[in-house]
Image: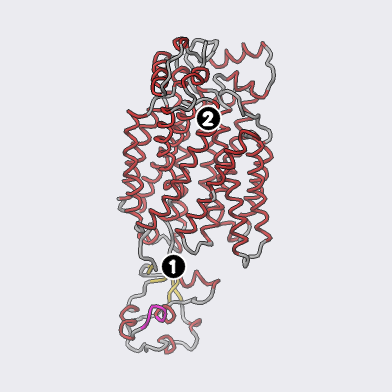
Amino acid sequence: MPTVDDVLEQVGEFGWYQKRVFLTLCLTSAALAPIYLGIVFLGFSPPHHCRSPGVSELSQRCGWSPAEELNYTVPGLGAADEAFLRQCMQYEVDWNQSTLGCVDPLASLAANRSHLPLVPCQHGWVYDTPGSSIVTEFDLVCADAWKVDLFQSCVNLGFFLGSLGIGYIADRFGRKLCLLLTSLVMALSGVLTAVSPDYTSMLLFRLLQGMVSKGTWMSGYTLITECVGSGYRRTVAILYQVAFTVGLLGLSWLAYAIPHWRWLQLAVSLPTFFFLLYYWCVPESPRWLLSQKRNTQAIKIMSHIARKNGKSPPADLQILSLEEDGTDKQSPSFIDLFRTPNLRKHTCILMYIWFSCAVVYQGLVMHMGATSRNIYLDFFFSALVELPAAFIILVTIDRAGRIYPLALSSLVAGAACLVMLFISQDQRWLNIAVACLGRMGITIVLQMICLVNAELYPTFIRSLGVMVCSALCDVGGIFTPFMVFRLMEIWQALPLVLFGVLGLSAGGVTLLLPETKGVALPETIQDAENLQRKAKPKENTVYLQVQTRT
């Protein structure tokens, strides 16, 4: 009986119809970019100082320039190590008193300014920016600066919570239904975030958006990889993630054109309502339909693909099958991810790679952001580094396979982080170059791990396997903002040590995974278990079949 791959070889592994569906689904990948890394613009913290009543009136009366006003009224100016003083403290002075002069007004109060008492900001802050962010609107600075980290952590927490259920929904009720439901909630929560009246409600809506947005991305990813033949599967998987990079590039220009965070949030959220049109544009996965014993629908979709590709449906299409010995419909279960020895090993290794990838990737983005002089250009050029990563994958994946490039890229990322420890801060461009090399390496890992993850699991638990393993990416993302800045308080380069150790160790354990180049997607647990074996004892076949029935 023919399998899906057999039929696709005859009707087109990546024909006109699959290309149209692929380009349509790429929009969901691009839409994830502002959710995952939009914090760079939504939560940017501009230069700021305490607002002191009476200062603006005194400045106007004396005719001070902005620089003179800051020099006379703000403590800690000119000292690089006193940023906390100039941003979070103010002189305990009544600026409305008439005894203050226009030339060095504090001289009449103390011979040395350092002897004047300082207090935390009492009346809010003045921000040096033409736009707005959640920082400037809700005063998330100084004692409340951690709330920006919490805002970003909530997105990753949402990713994690969503991965616990959305993968199951995609495997139990279908990729297409999951895609439509999560797209609707993602669009609604994005709009609600933009109109949130306070920080708490904004945080809750951001959490909700995180819970469904990863499900939208992963449903689209799984759906398109299951609709093309094995010869093109890795190409569409990589290019689908390139769409994420395109989303990052577009986000930098959109943020430059719309410097106000509420309007920017609306601009990236409202277009996602168009994803509901996928009901008419995107088919259900024929592989998933076959795994659920819905053969008639699968055959109808394969016939439709053949006609759209200008091919005639094969004569043996009516007996399309997954080549399973059992006749019961397979239902996904978390236990299936650990049911056999090889699946257990693969699941644990994949979880660690996802975790290390998240910490290193987000950590390097934060490191680049900390040295940014132009937030828009720096974000744009750092995102450009990800494009060569995709082409490197496409060039090497057919020649060297999946595992060796994946391991090497992780090792390069880890080594780059450790090399940065020995580069002087004065050598700024060398630091940036090495950081970009690390960014490229970890980007290759991030793009390839999705492909490898999907290829190691059978159809009926594929979405569940990818979502559960990638949940460790979300766990890493939850703690990375806090880990990075707390470690920097101990030693500024300490996060780089952590990134280096994670990258090198992840590269080592990657070599324990089986190569999947040129191997058909496993359809059953037995196929997945046999990926690392040349032959399989007969008695194991009976055991596995008993275990997969529910």
Q: Secondary structure at mark 1?
A: loop
Question: Does residue 440 belong to the magenta stretch?
Answer: no
Q: Residue at x 46, y 30 (%)?
A: 224
State whether residue 386 is above or below residue 93.
Answer: above
534 left or right of 40 in image: right
- As measured in the structure, the alpha-carbon distance from the residue carrying label 2 to the one carrying label 1 is 47 Å
Of all residues, the one furthest to the front in this rendering is 310
Residue marked by disc 1: 47
State whether residue 43 is above or below residue 355.
Answer: below
Q: Quadrant of residue 272?
A: top left
Residue 302 appears at what percent x and percent y?
42, 19
Q: Secondary structure at mark 2?
A: helix
Residue type at mark 1? Pro
Towards the viewer: 331 or 447: 447
Please report contact status of discs 2 and 1: CB closer than 8 Å, yes or no: no
The circle on residue 233 is 2
Residue 327 appears at what percent x and percent y?
50, 10
Towards the viewer: 156 or 424: 424
Residue type at mark 2? Arg
Q: Residue at x 69, y 40 (%)?
A: 508
Residue 542 appears at what percent x and percent y?
62, 11
- Magenta range is 64-68
For label 1, count other residues whose C-alpha is less than 10 Å away and answer few (under 14), some (14-19) or many (20+): few
Residue 19 appears at what percent x and percent y?
43, 31
Q: Nearer the viewer, mark 2 or mark 1?
A: 2
* Secondary structure predominantly adopted by residues drawn in magenta: helix
For label 2, count other residues whose C-alpha is less than 10 Å away and answer few (under 14), some (14-19) or many (20+): many
